[in-house]
Amino acid sequence: LLAAATAAAALGLSVDQIAAAASNLEAGQRRGRVHQLGNAISVVDDSYNASPVAMTRLLELLSSAPGRRVAVLGEMYELGEQTAAAHRKVGQLAAASCDLLVATGGEGAVELAAAARAEGMDPGTVHHVSDAEAAVRLLNTVLQSDDVVLIKGSRGVGLDRAVDALLGWEAT
């Protein structure tokens, strides 16, 4: 947005014109779209992909959300030697940012959940599940009115299927 605004300003558009155009922007599919479920449950679908920086920024945003904060975090792929350390760091931040954590996937998700527990998160609020379908089954039993649910993970984890299931869409 900043790059586009700078280009628009260079082409002579006023700040007011740029702001008006920006107010009509929507997040791309699976990139931060907010959906409303029944019982005032908000689902933030950022399931397209994940990196340590993106996970950090969204957890920081989640930490300021009203209501109970639920993070469904999938593994981050293609991190090489940094894989374990990156998942530990995200788990530590999750402990400070959310009230309920669902770590989804294999070894990285196990590492993430363990780090959240080690950081002091109540073990009863930290869950590890193997895949998106298991995450949905768990969420269907624990979601409450006014929850804010962040769903983020690498594309290969398939958390888009979890979003679709929660929204009642047929998975694609």
Image (tube, rainbow, N blue to C red):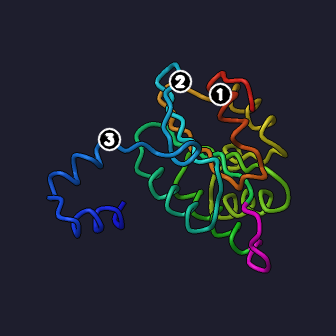
Q: Residue at x 71, y 66 (%)?
A: 87
Check disc 2 and report its element: helix, strand or loop.
Answer: loop
Q: Position of residue 140 (x, y in %)?
A: 69, 26
Numbered mark located on residue 37 in the image:
2
Q: Say what secondary structure mark 3 lies in.
A: loop
User: Quick check: is 45 in the magenta stretch?
Assistant: no
Residue indicated by mark 1: 166
N-terminal of the pair, mark 1 or mark 3, is 3
Is 134 above or below relative to 49?
Answer: above
Q: Which mark is residue 24?
A: 3
Residue drawn 51% across the image and 45% down it: 28
Q: Which residues are magenta?
A: 76-84
Disc with the residue nearer the chain's start (3 vs 2): 3
Residue 105 percent across, percent down from the top left: 81, 51
How crowded pointer 3 is (Cα within 10 Å; few <14, some 14-19, many 20+) is rated as: few
Q: Quadrant of the C terminus?
A: top right
